[in-house]
Amino acid sequence: MRFISRLTAALTAAAMLAGFCSCGGKKKEGEEHHHHNLVEDNMGDDVNVSQDDLPFGALESILGTDAVPIEICYDTRYITEDEAAKISKYFSALNNKDTELFNSVVYEPYLSKLIENADCTSVDDYIATQYTTLTQQLGDGFVFDYIYFEEALLQGQYDFTDFDTVILNNDPTVQITDRKLLTAVVEYKNNVDGDSHVKNINVCLYTINGQSYIVR
């Protein structure tokens, strides 16, 4: 099945919409992903579309399982390859209760605050708590197998004050150069029915001292 991402820019003609291939649900058997899509060649030479006018997900790139633990599709205008890789690792770490992998992508000072707020005693304890919560929501034996994105809220589109406060209270000297809140659509199966399901999960990323991190 293919799920359609939320549009973030209005297109001037409905006919143009058919010319775009957006990041969506995992391909059906025999269906091909189109990685670097813009506008179909048959739209005509007189059509000139700005990247800013394309719907969210139109500039699609995919990292496969040869590069990351979980295949992930992302719009390169909003999400870098490094960020996409870290999000894939983040969900894999939660799925497999992999503390080492989790620590490699999450900003440690913010993680310490999350552990404290969850009344946990360690990263292992926190991940186990998150896994239990996900099992209650997704079903026993859930396995994430594909990720794409429905929305990206950037600086100026969302209030990141609470995140900033935790980070800067820990170290006022850090340089924050980017903030974004992403709505990830995660496809998964479980042991309950074996069918494919989807779950929207928000992921917040910060660029701190030149490195991207997940803070939630």
Image: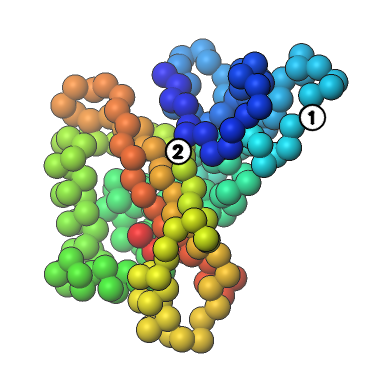
The amino acid type found where label 2 is placed reads Glu
Is 4 or 111 nearer to us in this picture?
4
Report the residue marked by disc 2: 150
Which residue is painted at 84% across and 22% down in the image?
46
Instruction: Locate the N terminus and report the quarter of the image it occupies.
Output: top left
Number of the front mark, 2 or 1: 1
Quadrant in the rendering for residue 193: top left
Q: Residue at x 17, y 57 (%)?
A: 129
* Residue at mark 2 to residue at mark 1: CA–CA distance: 25 Å
Q: Tell me: residue 19, above or below residue 154.
A: above
Q: Position of residue 19 (x, y in %)?
A: 66, 20
Label 1 belongs to which residue?
48
Q: Amino acid at mark 1?
A: Asn
Where disc 2 sits, the SS reads strand
Residue 140, located in which quarter of the rendered image?
top left
Judge by depth and name the residue closer to the eye, 125 or 10. 10
- The residue furthest right is 45
The 10 Å Cα crowd at callout 1, few under 14, some 14 to 19, many 20 or more, is: few
Circles 2 and 1 in contact, beta carbons < 8 Å: no
| In-image side of 7 versus 166 (left or right) | right
In this rendering, would 137 be left or right of 161? Answer: left
Q: Is residue 128 left or right of residue 99?
A: left
x and y percent of residue 10 in the render? 59, 33
Q: Residue 152, position in %: x, y?
A: 49, 48
Which image quadrant for residue 175? bottom right
Residue 60 seen by the camera:
no
In the picture, the quarter occupied by the C terminus is bottom left
Q: Residues within 10 Å of mark 2 (few under 14, many from 20)?
A: many
89 to 54, vertically: above or below: below
